[in-house]
Amino acid sequence: MLYAVLCYAAEDAVTSWSKEQDEAVMGKLAVIQQKYAEAGRLGPVARLLPTTAATTVRKVRGESVILDGPFAETKEQLLGFYTVECNDLEEAVGFAREISDANPAGGSYEIRPVGVLNPVPATIKQAT
C-alpha cells in the first residue's frame, strides 16, 4: 500500500533554524530516506516553500477567487510530504515515528493511504 505522510509543524520554528541546524535535521532525515529508498519503497519527497509563497484558488459563490497565501490560519502548516510503500498502516506509523524523532520542531505527521490517479509521466523531471 502506498501512503502519503504529510508533515505539519510551526513554520516559524522551522524557518528560524540556522543553516547548520537545518542541515543537521535534513541529514537525519536523509538517513531514514536512504533506508527506504534502498529498499525500493520511497516515492517522491517534497519540502514545500513557506506559506508566504502560496497561492490559493477558492470557489466563492460559484466563481474562482485567487488568494495570497494559504486559505486557513493555523498554528501548524503543511511543510512537506513523503510517499512511502508500506505493508500496512502499522509500518507507515513506524516510518512517521522515525521522521518525527529526527525533527526537533515537533509537529504532526498525518498518514493517508494513496490511490494513484496518474503516475508521474516520464516527461516530467523529478527533483533530485
Image (spheres, grey):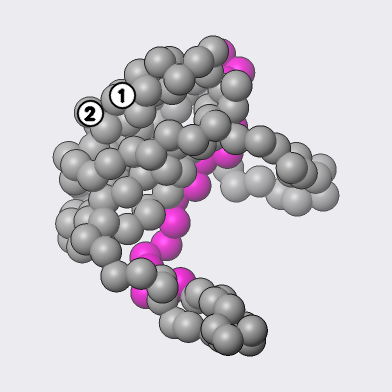
The residue depicted at 75 percent of the width and 51 percent of the height is 124
Please provide percent x and percent y for residue 39. 56, 13
The residue depicted at 26 percent of the width and 50 percent of the height is 9
Q: CA distance from mark 2 to mark 1?
A: 5 Å
Name above or below for residue 57 compared with residue 122. Answer: below
Residue 15 visible from this viewpoint: no
Indicate yes or no whether the magenta region holds residue 64: no
Q: Residues within 10 Å of mark 2 (few under 14, many from 20)?
A: few
Q: Which residue is mark 1?
A: 98
Q: Which of the 4 image quarters holds residue 68? A: bottom left
**Left or right: where does residue 82 sit relative to residue 18?**
right
Looking at the picture, tell me which residue is in the foreground, 37 or 108. Answer: 108
What count of labels does the image hold? 2
Name above or below for residue 115 compared with residue 38. Answer: below
Please provide percent x and percent y for residue 60. 55, 84
The residue depicted at 66 percent of the width and 36 percent of the height is 115
**Is disc 2 in contact with disc 1, using a CB cutoff of under 8 Å?**
yes
Q: Which residues are magenta?
A: 38-54
Q: What is the quadrant of the N terminus in the image?
A: top right
The residue depicted at 36 percent of the width and 44 percent of the height is 7
Q: Secondary structure at mark 1?
A: helix
Name above or below for residue 28 compared with residue 10. Answer: above
Q: What is the quadrant of the C terminus in the image?
A: top right
